[in-house]
């Protein structure tokens, strides 16, 4: 009986969290961020919007932990709070990965799907925060490099969507590598895991696991992009080498840290 009540509580709490997220997203889009657009100084406006988003997701993650929906185990988070611009490259097992990384990174900008520019919960947020659309590869690289030059950390999930299975990744796209090379910014690999799986590509929001899920985030040491591409001569070849090196690095560490398991 206790286990059943715990499950029902977490199901209700999860549903309420999605409702709060959706309502707040709409309110931010139609009220708060349009008012922010009246602020005359673009740089300070973006800083303020970024701070609001960071604070909101920190609060949401704290509430989800408080009500027993999830636990969060983070290693190396100081690298995300350091303030120096970098390209954060992470695997993408769950729907909550973006929320968690934004809650850990004070000055963050994201590459997001173009569809979010029409989503009623997101359109105002992505515009006000000057997030980068993935609609055009060239514009993505240029816009990302500009955000890095302005001092923001770029958060990118190079799989482009959630991972296909617990022990598999989609092939990485090269946009993050071109961006890092163009800006001369380091790449910070981030490992993410959710146990038991929740909010995966195959699951709906109401597919609540039998116990509270544990999200683990391991931030690895930064990688110098010049070293990864030292032997290459053209931008295209350099980006290909960087992409393959980072994908191999993340995949190997997912096994080393036990996030991926052999034989499954």
Image (tube, grey):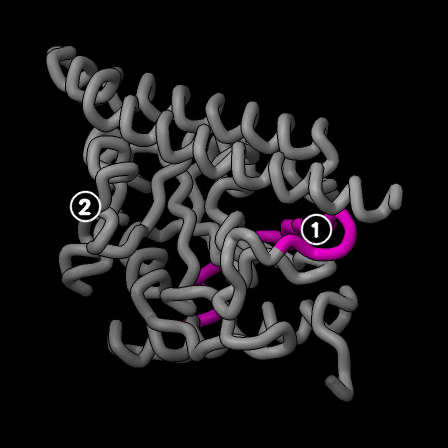
Give the image location of residue 18, x and y in percent: 47, 38
Q: Residue at x 19, y 64 (%)?
A: 137
* Disc 2 element: helix
* Disc 1 element: strand
Give the image location of residue 252, x and y in percent: 67, 75
Of residue 187 and residue 8, the one placed in the foreground of this image is 8
Of residue 93 and residue 156, the one placed in the foreground of this image is 93
Q: Name the mark nearer the viewer: 2 or 1.
A: 2
Q: Magenta segment, which residues?
A: 208-230
What is the number of the mark on residue 177?
none
Structural crowding at the residue carrying mark 1, measured as other residues with C-alpha within 10 Å and reported as few (<14), some (14–19) or many (≥20): some
Q: CA distance from mark 2 to mark 1?
A: 29 Å
Q: Give the residue at the far right of this rendering.
A: 2
**On screen, residue 25 above or below 37:** below
Task: Choose top left, top right, bottom left or bottom right for residue 229.
Answer: bottom left
Give the image location of residue 98, x and y in percent: 47, 46
Give the image location of residue 141, x and y in percent: 23, 57
Assess whether residue 16 is covered by the magenta stretch: no
Q: Give the left or right position of residue 165, taking residue 173 as reference.
A: right
Q: Residue at x 35, y 61 (%)?
A: 176
Q: Quadrant of the N terminus?
A: top right
Q: Give the residue at the far bottom of this rendering.
A: 263
Residue indicated by mark 1: 216
Residue indicated by mark 2: 117
Q: Residue at x 46, y 77 (%)?
A: 170
Which is nearer the N-term, disc 2 or disc 1? 2
Q: Residue at x 78, y 51 (%)?
A: 211
């Amino acid at each position: 009986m206790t286990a059943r009540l715990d499950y029902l509580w977490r199901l209700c709490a999860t549903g309420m969290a999605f409702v709060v997220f959706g309502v707040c997203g709409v309110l931010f889009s139609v009220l708060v961020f349009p008012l922010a657009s009246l602020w005359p100084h673009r740089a300070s406006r973006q800083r303020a919007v970024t701070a609001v988003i960071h604070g909101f997701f920190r609060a949401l993650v704290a509430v989800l932990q408080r009500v027993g929906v999830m636990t969060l185990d983070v290693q190396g988070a100081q690298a995300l709070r350091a303030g120096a611009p970098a390209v954060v490259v992470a695997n993408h097992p769950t729907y909550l990965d973006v929320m968690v990384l934004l809650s850990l990174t004070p000055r963050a900008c994201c590459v997001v799907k173009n569809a979010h520019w029409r989503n009623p919960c997101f359109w105002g947020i992505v515009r006000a925060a000057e997030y980068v659309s993935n609609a055009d590869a060239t514009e993505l690289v240029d816009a990302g490099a500009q955000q890095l030059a302005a001092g923001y950390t770029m958060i990118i999930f190079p799989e482009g969507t959630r991972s296909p299975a617990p022990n598999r990744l989609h092939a990485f796209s090269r946009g993050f590598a071109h961006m890092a090379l163009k800006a001369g910014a380091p790449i910070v690999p981030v490992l993410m895991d959710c146990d038991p799986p929740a909010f995966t590509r195959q699951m709906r929001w109401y597919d609540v696991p039998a116990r509270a899920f544990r999200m683990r985030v391991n931030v690895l040491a930064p990688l110098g992009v010049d070293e990864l591409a030292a032997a290459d001569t053209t931008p295209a070849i350099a980006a290909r080498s960087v992409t393959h090196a980072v994908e191999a690095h993340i995949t190997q560490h997912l096994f080393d840290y036990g996030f991926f398991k052999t034989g499954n």
